[in-house]
Amino acid sequence: MFLHLGGSSGKVGMLLIRRVGLFCRSAHLSPQSLEYRPIKKVMVANRGEIAIRVFRACTELGIRTVAVYSEQDTGQMHRQKADEAYLIGRGLSPVAAYLHIPDIIKVAKENSVDAIHPGYGFLSERADFAQACADAGVRFIGPSPEVVRKMGDKVEARALAIKAGVPVVPGTDAPISSLQEAEDFAKTYDFPIIFKAAYGGGGRGMRVVRDYEENLNLSLYISLCPFSQYLFFWLSLTGDKYGNVIHLYERDCSIQRRHQKVVEIAPAAQLDPHLRERLTSDSVNLAKQVGYENAGTVEFLVDKHGKHYFIEVNSRLQVEHTVTEEITDVDLVHAQLRVCEGRSLPELGLEQDKIQINGCAIQCRVTTEDPSRGFQPDTGRIEVFRSGEGMGIRLDSASAFQGAIISPHYDSLLVKVIASGKDLPTAATKMHRALTEFRVRGVKTNIPFLQNVLSNSQFLYATVDTQFIDENQKLFNLKPTQNRAQKLLHYLGHVMVNGPVTPIPVKAKSSSVDPVVPSVSLGATFDVAMRFLWECPWKRLQELRALIPNVPFQMLLRGANAVGYTNYPDNAVFKFCEVAKENGMDIFRVFDSLNYIPNMLLGMEAAGTAGGVVEAAISYTGDVSDPMRQKYSLEYYLKLANELVKAGTHILAIKDMAGLLKPEASRLLIGALRDRFPDVPIHVHTHDTAGAGVAAMLACAHAGADIVDVAVDSMAGMTSQPSMGAIVACTKGTKLDTGVSLDRVFDYSEYWEVARGLYAPFDCTATMKSGNADVYENEIPGGQYTNLHFQAHSMGLGNKFKEVKKAYVEANKLLGDLIKVTPSSKIVGDLAQFMVQNSLSRAEVEERADELSFPLSVVEFLQGHIGIPHGGFPEPFRSKVLKSLPRIEGRPGASLPPMDFEALESDLRMAHGDEITPEDVMSAAMYPKVFQEFKEFTSKFGPVDCLNTRLFLDGPKIADEFQVELERGKTLHIKALALGDLNKSGQREVFFELNGQLRSVLVKDTAAMKEMHFHPKALKDVRGQVGAPMPGKVVEVKVKPGQKVEKGQPLCVLSAMKMETVVNSPISGIISKVHVNADSSLEGDDLILEITE
């Protein structure tokens, strides 16, 4: 059923209907009674593509053109395509400007305009506008004012159709004035019914009603329509001033969303010839009945039994007139202009027997809407525009060009794409190919959705109806666009404007020399790959495995902490090892920062269950060669090793992260382990901070170690590992000869010496100039030693690093003399920096432990979050710090509930799309926030792992030319051209040449924006902050500060591109602050209000 809302703009659009185009003229005039009056100048009282379409027709006919434009449309293409252009509606809203009849008429009269073409929308079906033109002596290119009035009044149009013998949809004969009338109607015909505007056009004026209380308004015209499984046909007509009327066959516009046409087809495929005859005959009869002149369209609904019903007449040119033109070879705009001049249809060669159907045509409306978000309009600047063209393709557009600004003020139509072929499948193939060629960047479009429609078998077999979209949710399984090139330009521009994205520890320039051999991928700490390199660690592993298929790979597994710094449920550790093994990992070096056996055993079991080689690593501290240091004695390590070997480790490792193994201690420890476990491979890892690493590793080798870790010469020494070249040279010719050629070592080292220069800001030599034997006193691990040094310099405390190291010793003693490996080393470091920053001695910390606010890592350690240290927790320090805080007894992860990976994957797909992999799920399980930031970064900046190191860190310099290989066979050729001045939005335009074409990106200057005021953005990780889901204007604010709201309650209404969106409350709570008012203009994610739970 249809309800027509009196006085509001609306139109049919929910059921499949085909329209037949009409051109008519008064039946009471003869050619002799009219005078042919040529048109010399035409104004189009419209904007966008329809204005340009009319201008082109005028130019072809030698007619001068005039455009009008609003203040917001000064940069629009239709203004530039006309011979003359004039501003209208100064000071009015964007839409009101094009509805301001006095201004339009004034411009027409002042500039000797002969005729005005209304286009579609705006004033095109306003009888008062047609009359204003007549009163001003300017011809209206369309029907007479009286016909426009009659056809615009849906009640009168329905009565005229009945009088002409045309079947109509059951409904009320007049606008209803009360809810009771609507209820009486519904009782007669049953629900559902449709409300339809009594005046105006457009499917936005229709609304389905399923019960008595839903969406009922006064002044309604009700028309019955059991709307499921119907077809919508539009019949195109044209008539002249002499009573001649012809039809141009039908268009199938059944594929609709929210009663708005999405895809239009002409002619209707598989239409029964008898039905076509009835449709065309009724359309022509109705047009003649009213004396219709010029172009128009009659709208019908056809049910599943083949019965047709009149809906309305659109007394204007239709958006989809293009497909009618393509199948009939009739230029409808030419015909409109000539008919307005006084020509008859026969004079123009437009006679019914000459109008034939030639093939099939499809029109797709490419809009700046996001199908994945309910077709919300998108706005912004088009950064890239490349259209699909070729044989059988026609494009009608206006704002489709690079640099165009898509505003929220007007319709979201970007370009109409029309494909022609011999039949529907052929036209669909051409359309799909053309849409695939399109590249639109900067704003979202509905192209992926349209491609799904065109690929649907129901569409290709022409069995669609008005429920097609609603019943085919697979149409919304959208293939994501990659947009890699433009995203990389955004990244490069961002670095050029704002500097490196990755935090730089010190101000040191990267080397300008590149390595002379091709770069190879290397491993990185799991979270560092995502956090600082913005790369997927799994992808890196997969690429390495493919390049190096025959060398075992090893990873570090922090026992029950997996690759993180916290506790995980047991099933998460097992799952991580399983996925790592599937991706090419072979050996799992399992350790625990406290040597806490329960944590280590869990990691070993997880690695073994996954099928990996288990290497249990004992973290080393103290000095087994010093009889005065008994906490971590030789017997302690032997006892640990015995438990690990009994547990089934395949390899036994000593993990000396601080480089504390002296040659004598190496001989004692490794010798004892070799004697105790003669058949177990022994692996030793150390750092060379003190400079004795080579001697210590040689001592280990002589004592029976099978493997020692080294670093290539150019990367060795200080806080890194001992020198590979030194070990190879010292063992050459002995029973420990490695068999490695020194020449190969030197070649390898030369490459990394040059590569190291690229990372100068991160190099330990930027602040450290030598190793330091004081590590035997402070026991700071190599990696942490470097980090603390960087931190001290970055905070201006470089001259106090000695003080930091002393505090580290005292902090270690406060915590009970810990084994210091990540994360325990971080806990000691956090406490040390806390002491230095607050000028606290060890004694003062112990004395004031119950009142100081300690770093969270220290508190959680004392609670037992990472396990139990050897010898237990320090008392009374622990009790004074914790007071009444809860304590964890035993293995921390044992009490955690299993992780729900299916739910996690579902959440990730909801947030990031269906491209989520099992590896992504594991990344999110280990580092939820880091993974979220990684996905947001790559969504914005693309695959930055394609960039070389210098481009990644420093960006290009002006005039730099370089290549970026996205994948095999796809290489970008880029040149940095210029950096623009700061604009009023705090942005700089950065210009590039990409593959020979000019490209530009707008980059926010973060430093400049700190001094400029902008509307705050909603933080996604703060639950109570509600952001704008799309750019637009605030129509209504429904709440105020202090008001209590429930989850799902409407907060405000936004409007953009004729679409209103209600923003609902995501949570229940109290409105703490409202950041917008009615009429506020917002960008996407602008903060609307804040809610306190």
Image (cartoon, rainbow, N blue to C red):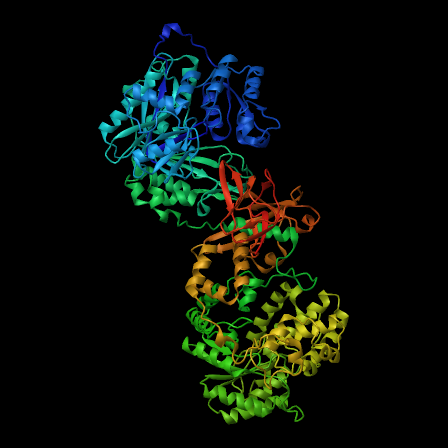
Residue 897, placed above or below residue 32: below
Residue 933 picture location, percent across and down: 55, 59
Residue lying furthest top: 32
Q: Quadrant of residue 904?
A: bottom left
Residue 83, placed above or below residue 923: above
Q: What is the count of numbered marks? A: 0
Residue 260 visible at all: no
Residue lying furthest front: 180
Q: Quadrant of residue 425?
A: top left
Residue 509 picture location, percent across and down: 68, 61
Residue 468 picture location, percent across and down: 33, 42
* Left or right of 436 on screen, residue 740: right
* Left or right of 7 on screen, residue 406: right
Please state which of residues 191 and 158 is positioned toward the viewer in this rendering: 191
Residue 771, placed above or below residue 379: below
Quarter placement of the N terminus:
top left
Residue 969 picture location, percent across and down: 45, 53
Quarter placement of the C terminus:
bottom right
Residue 737 visible at all: yes
